[in-house]
Image: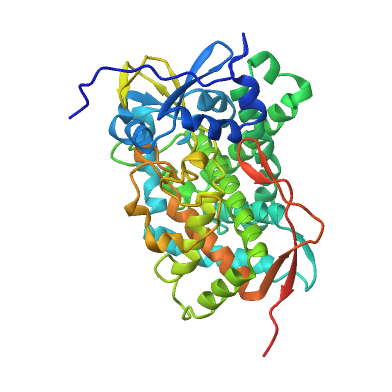
């Protein structure tokens, strides 16, 4: 039963400037600003210029919006900005169309389908990791981006297609080159007024060019796949197949938009998470030792998973807690609604930040301490719904959450089985907050394990 208590007004965060509102703080301080306003209440108001935006700070509010009353909300401003450039795929689409597309894609992300991809993931990881040389300094952030893009492209487009593995690998390199630029442009367009965001000084032309290049790559991939209608079990074959809700399968434009959505969500977010995972391994050799021992003990033929690599899985859970890459997500109110006693008007924009949720000391004691074993004493199921949201919640939860975890387990196993990654002396790694929170750079020296 919903609350019948009198509604309350969401307090306004301090520091509002005339005309600009809280825009300077959000544009400059970003996560620090969102972290600072948590003490104001479970839902607070900030202003981007004269436009009010409600910030969800409590697990109850996040769960209410993403799950309990999800039908009363749509994706919001961030996704309005992204839609013209990455299309109307699963990230940006709404309501009935989103449900239809998600159902069509779901078979590719079942556990048996993911298990069938483990061999391809392992081959790609092993090929790249085995090429490293003892003592070599590897730009891990760049290498992880290329590796994750290659893995995703190889499952999106079967290498058995006529264009072959070489074309798939080339496509992966081109996609990786453009993704970061496009995501940065989406972020700038969200937090800044349109006349400022479209300034050449902020790279708007480069953003438009990268978005056009990505669309062209996806269009070409769809056209080539359409010429060979053989069902090869890859994602494009699944998109083309008919479903009860869509007997004709996806059109070329729909398939292109889904490719762009999956590349955007899958390659960048997963590669950034892996970069932070390697950063933590470099700082904590004892964790590297423990992960290596666990991976080496995995019997031949047993697939890496949370059940077979429990410590490595806890390690990744902690990386996703402390280094959650998606710091800013949004929703928009479709009809007047009450959330946690606060009345939200139709059309109101909402913000929630998984980063600040994951650093709440009420649920994560000593929240800035990196500790995989915190998940032994209090598992994800023990937390209030909405307190830990690395892949969001509800009907918009990331469709590829298990796929991404499988990729990361495979990559970590491939790396630590051969190498001990170590930080480069004198090179400070710091977070850069744009569309995602990523390392400014991550050079690491790789050393082989001593032989007995």
Q: Quadrant of the N terminus?
A: top left
**Where in the figure is residue 220, as x and y percent of width and height?**
61, 40
Q: Nearer the viewer, residue 380 or 194?
A: 380
**Where in the figure is residue 55, as x and y percent of width and height?**
46, 27
On the question of residue 156 being in view, the answer is no
For image coordinates 46% across by 64% down, the residue present is 373
For image coordinates 55% across by 71% down, the residue present is 291
Q: Residue furthest right?
A: 426
Q: Nearer the viewer, residue 434 or 85?
A: 434
Q: Residue furthest left?
A: 1
**Where in the figure is residue 54, as x and y percent of width and height?**
45, 22
On the question of residue 159 being in view, the answer is yes
Q: Quadrant of the C terminus?
A: bottom right
For image coordinates 59% across by 74% down, the residue present is 289
The vertical placement of 134 against 368, above or below, is: below
In terms of image quadrants, where is residue 240?
A: top left
């Amino acid at each position: 039963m919903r609350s019948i208590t009198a509604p309350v007004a969401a307090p306004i965060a301090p520091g509002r400037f005339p005309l600009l509102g809280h825009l300077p703080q959000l544009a400059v301080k970003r996560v620090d600003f969102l972290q600072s306003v948590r003490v104001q209440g479970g839902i607070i108001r900030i202003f981007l210029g004269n436009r009010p935006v409600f910030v969800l700070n409590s697990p109850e509010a996040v769960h209410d919006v993403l799950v309990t009353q999800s039908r009363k909300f749509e994706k919001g401003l961030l996704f309005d900005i992204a839609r013209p450039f990455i299309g109307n795929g699963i990230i940006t689409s709404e309501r009935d169309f989103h449900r239809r597309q998600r159902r069509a894609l779901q078979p590719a992300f079942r556990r048996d389908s993911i298990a069938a991809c483990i061999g391809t993931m392992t081959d790609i990881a092993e090929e790249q990791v085995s090429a490293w040389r003892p003592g070599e300094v590897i730009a891990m952030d760049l290498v992880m981006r290329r590796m994750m893009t290659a893995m995703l492209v190889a499952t999106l487009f079967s290498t058995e297609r006529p264009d072959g593995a070489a074309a798939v690998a080339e496509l992966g390199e081109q996609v990786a080159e453009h993704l970061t630029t496009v995501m940065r442009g989406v972020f700038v367009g969200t937090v800044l007024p349109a006349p400022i965001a479209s300034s050449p000084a902020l790279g708007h032309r480069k953003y438009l060019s990268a978005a056009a290049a990505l669309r062209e790559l996806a269009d070409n991939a769809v056209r080539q796949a359409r010429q060979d209608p053989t069902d090869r079990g890859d994602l494009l074959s699944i998109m083309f197949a008919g479903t009860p809700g869509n007997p004709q399968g996806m059109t070329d434009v729909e398939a292109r938009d889904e490719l762009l959505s999956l590349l955007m969500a899958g390659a960048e977010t997963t590669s950034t998470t892996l970069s932070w995972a390697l950063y933590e391994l470099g700082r904590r050799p004892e964790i590297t030792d423990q992960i290596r021992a666990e991976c080496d003990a995995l019997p031949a033929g047993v697939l890496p998973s949370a059940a077979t690599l429990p410590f490595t899985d806890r390690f990744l859970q902690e990386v996703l807690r402390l280094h959650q890459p998606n710091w800013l997500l949004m929703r928009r109110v479709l009809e007047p609604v009450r959330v946690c006693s606060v009345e939200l008007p139709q059309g109101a924009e909402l913000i929630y930040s998984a980063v600040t949720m994951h650093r709440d000391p009420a649920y994560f004691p000593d929240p800035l301490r990196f500790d995989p074993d915190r998940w032994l004493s209090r598992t994800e199921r023990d937390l209030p719904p909405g307190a830990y949201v690395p892949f969001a919640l509800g009907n918009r939860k990331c469709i590829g959450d298990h796929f991404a975890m499988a990729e990361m387990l495979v990559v970590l196993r491939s790396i630590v089985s051969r190498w001990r990654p170590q930080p480069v002396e004198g090179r400070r790694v710091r977070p850069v907050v744009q569309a995602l929170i990523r390392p400014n750079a991550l050079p690491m020296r790789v050393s082989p394990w001593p032989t007995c």
